């Protein structure tokens, strides 16, 4: 009987973690606005003022977008976009951009192809 209870508890915990994760497919759908500055796959548009976010850790992207949304991190452009995002939207966008292969080899923008 105890083993059934343990399995049930583990199942609930694991399913909660799965639900908390972002959906990269939905993130792609949501990313249309992001693409103007960050590029389709998050590798930028050739303008160094917009960061390359492809391949960045999902938890970092989530943290950054929540900080933009709250105004803790200041950027007029990102504030406007981030305020319209739900927590799940942020998770989905983060999952999408984290799953993209980054083309950044070093920190010098002229070396990004």
Image (tube, rainbow, N blue to C red):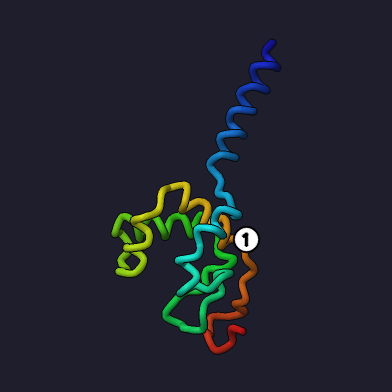
The outermost residue toward the top is 1
Q: Measured from the top left, where is residue 72 in percent x and y?
A: 30, 59
Q: Nearer the viewer, residue 8 or 80?
A: 80
Q: Is residue 99 left or right of residue 107?
A: right
Q: Which residue is mark 1?
A: 99
Front-most of residues 85 and 68: 85
Among the 4 quarters of the image, the one containing residue 41: bottom right
Q: Is residue 68 left or right of residue 50?
A: left
The number of discs equals: 1
Quick one: 107 or 109, which is closer to the camera?
109
Position of residue 89 measured from the top left corner of the image (x, y, whole percent): 47, 51
Identify the residue at the far bottom of this view: 110
Q: Which quadrant, please, contains the C terminus?
A: bottom right
Residue located 59% across and 28% down the image: 12
Disc 1 secondary structure class? helix
Give whichever of 42, 112 is nearer the camera: 42
Q: Quadrant of the N terminus?
A: top right
- Position of residue 52 relative to residue 113, above or below, is above
Image point 65% across, 21% down: which residue? 6
Which residue is drawn at the image coordinates 58% and 31% (left, top)?
A: 13
Q: Quadrant of residue 58?
A: bottom right
Q: Residue at x 59, y 66 (%)?
A: 55
Does 112 sit above or below residue 42? Answer: below
Q: State the image quarter where residue 68 is shown.
A: bottom left
**Where residue 49 appears, x then y in whole percent?**
42, 80
Crowd band around label 1 with a 10 angstrom C-alpha radius: few (<14), some (14–19), many (20+): some
- Residue 85, percent from left and from top: 40, 53
């Amino acid at each position: 009987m105890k083993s059934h209870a343990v399995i049930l508890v583990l199942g609930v915990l694991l399913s909660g973690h799965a639900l908390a994760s972002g959906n990269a497919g939905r993130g792609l759908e949501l990313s249309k606005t992001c693409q103007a500055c960050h590029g389709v796959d998050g590798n930028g548009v050739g303008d160094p003022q917009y960061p390359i976010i492809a391949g960045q850790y999902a938890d970092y992207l989530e943290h950054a977008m929540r900080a933009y949304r709250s105004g803790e991190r200041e950027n007029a452009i990102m504030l406007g976009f981030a305020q319209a995002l739900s927590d799940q939207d942020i998770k989905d966008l983060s999952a999408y951009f984290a799953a993209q292969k980054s083309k950044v080899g070093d920190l010098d923008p002229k070396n990004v192809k």
